[in-house]
Image (spheres, coloured by chain):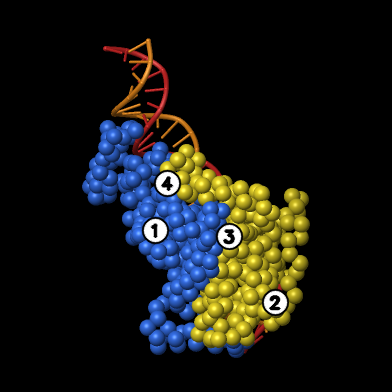
Chain colours: A yellow, B blue, C red, D orange
DNA sequence: ACCACTAAATGAATGCCATTCATTTATTAG
DNA sequence: CTAATAAATGAATGGCATTCATTTAGTGGT
């Protein structure tokens, strides 16, 4: 177990750098924190398509196979990233603000964080919480907020799951192109839909309303907040 | 353009079958409908991991490269499958039942169809409707339902998007393992969450309530229906 | 009737990717 | 001191989507 892992990356592989010889180095080059940081850096620079085990290894100035001493598979890397991102979600209003407001700020923050990381959503959705301590911590804070707000204990998890489902779906929506609903040559066959799309576009142009994805998210979130809020005892 | 494409598959590649010689065959072996059908068959048999271009080609008794005369990339195959699945979504209550009920049956049907096909969700979410005629047709029907129910034109699209986001997120939830929320060794540090999880499990065991994913979906859907319903003029 | 063009197939690459394994070297436990 | 373990390299491996040259068959124009 490495006590204090060495600084990682070291100006990743300058051309002239002497090749490291085989065998265990005196100080470990890798650890989970470093792998996570490098993965995030790589993702922000090249996107999720650019996140390959080979690319990650290069970022860390290490052979690809070295990564497998620390993670069993690429999925584990995604898991590390996911858990780190969850720690960025703002839960601070739980305990200090009314339930409605706490949910509102949590949900917006949660959506915004994962809108940039939608490839993780399939991973999260199936991820046992045991494997993700930060994620578990978030659930604890949110659960306490719901219980303190008077939710019956047996409705808390379902309510959170419902909100989360909406949040994940909405995160995808953020990544959609602006003109996703333009029917093009088919417009003639879909008069009602086409009119609705045009009307929404006109609205968002004239009014000071934000991006379509934000409008839909606000609409759905407020509906969920008031609908779920009615469950409180 | 093939007038009447030949029956496809033909007991896919019996060992003894003579190898087809190179060159264009008299009757086209492939078309989009056949590719779609074979893809669905393959998916249902081997799942989305088993849906490879090579596997699809084998299913159709054809060389992999032949597929590229009909689709530009694998993404196009997914698109064909997506559009076909959308045609299975039940929109029949729009026009014959009250708005609330129509939305309810549509949403359940939509979720159930895509719960088996979550790998398509990232594709759908970014898919311009022009490329998917069945999907466009669904939007038309649903839009008309909203307008007839008295929704202001400029809120229709946002409302549908909000519902869809919830539906997609909930489809993932269906695929989650039952014990996803078991905190295991960390349970001690998350008392509120752990209690809520146990309480929900007890409820669903004692009561006749369905799977957790169904409970959460119903909860969120009813909240959205009543929240969005308030927008009607 | 001929000929150029296009459509639809084969089969052989190509390059990328995650993962595995044998090997080497260093640290640690008994 | 020695055996076990940890952490690195480097060389496979097998699967994957995709491309390209080639072959054959239909089609439209003169």
Residue B133 is marked as 4
**Residue at which label 1 appears:** B94
| Residue designated by label 2 | A93
Which secondary structure lies at badge 2?
A: loop
Chain under numbered label 2: A
Q: CA distance from mark 2 to mark 1?
A: 40 Å
Q: Are the numbered discs 2 and 4 placed on the same chain, yes or no?
A: no
Check disc 2: other Cα within 10 Å, few if <14, some if 14-19, many if 20+: some
Indicate the position of residue B198 as horizontal and vertical percent values: 50, 87
Q: Nearer the viewer, mark 3 or mark 2?
A: 3
- Chain identifier of the residue bearing label 3 in the image: A
- State the SS at label 1: loop
Dot 4: chain letter? B
Q: Quote the CA–CA distance across marks 3 and 4.
A: 23 Å
The residue drawn where x is 62% and y is 86% is A148
Instruction: Write the residue at 50% across / 46% down.
Output: A194
Work out how far the residue at label 1 is from the one at label 3, CA to CA, in angstroms.
22 Å
The answer to whether marks 4 and 1 mark residues whose Cβ atoms lie closer than 8 Å is no
Q: Earlier in the sequence, mark 4 or mark 1?
A: 1
Circle 1 residues within 10 Å: few <14, some 14–19, many ≥20:
many
Residue holding disc 3: A216
For the C terminus of chain A, the image quarter is bottom right
- Graded by Cα atoms within 10 Å as few (under 14), some (14 to 19) or many (20 or more), the crowding at tag 4 reads some
**Secondary structure beneath disc 4?**
helix
Tag 1 and tag 3, C-beta contact below 8 Å: no
B8 or A139: nearer the eye?
Answer: A139
The CA span between labels 4 and 1 is 19 Å
Give the CA distance from mark 3 to mark 2: 23 Å
Query: The disc numbered 1 marks a residue on which chain?
Result: B
In this rendering, does residue A104 appear at all?
A: yes
């Amino acid at each position: 177990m490495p006590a204090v892992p060495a600084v990682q990356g070291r100006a990743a592989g300058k051309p002239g750098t002497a090749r490291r010889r085989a065998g265990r180095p005196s100080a470990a080059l890798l650890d989970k924190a470093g792998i996570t940081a490098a993965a995030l850096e790589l993702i922000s620079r090249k996107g999720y398509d650019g996140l390959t085990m080979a690319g990650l290894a290069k970022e860390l100035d290490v052979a690809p196979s070295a990564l497998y001493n620390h993670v069993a598979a690429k999925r584990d890397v995604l898991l590390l990233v996911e858990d780190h991102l969850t720690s960025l979600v703002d839960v601070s209003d739980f305990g200090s603000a009314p339930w409605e407001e706490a949910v509102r700020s949590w949900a917006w923050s949660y959506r915004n964080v994962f809108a940039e990381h939608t490839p993780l959503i399939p991973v999260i959705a199936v991820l046992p919480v045991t494997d993700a301590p930060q994620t578990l911590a978030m659930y604890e804070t949110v659960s306490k907020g719901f219980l303190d707000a008077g939710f019956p204990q047996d409705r808390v998890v379902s309510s959170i799951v419902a909100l989360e489902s909406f949040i994940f779906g909405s995160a995808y929506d953020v990544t959609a192109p602006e003109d996703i609903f333009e029917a093009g040559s088919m417009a003639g066959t879909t008069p009602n839909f086409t009119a609705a799309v045009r009307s929404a576009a006109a609205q968002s142009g004239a009014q000071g309303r934000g991006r379509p994805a934000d409008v839909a998210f606000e609409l759905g979130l407020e509906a969920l907040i008031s609908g779920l809020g009615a469950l409180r005892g």
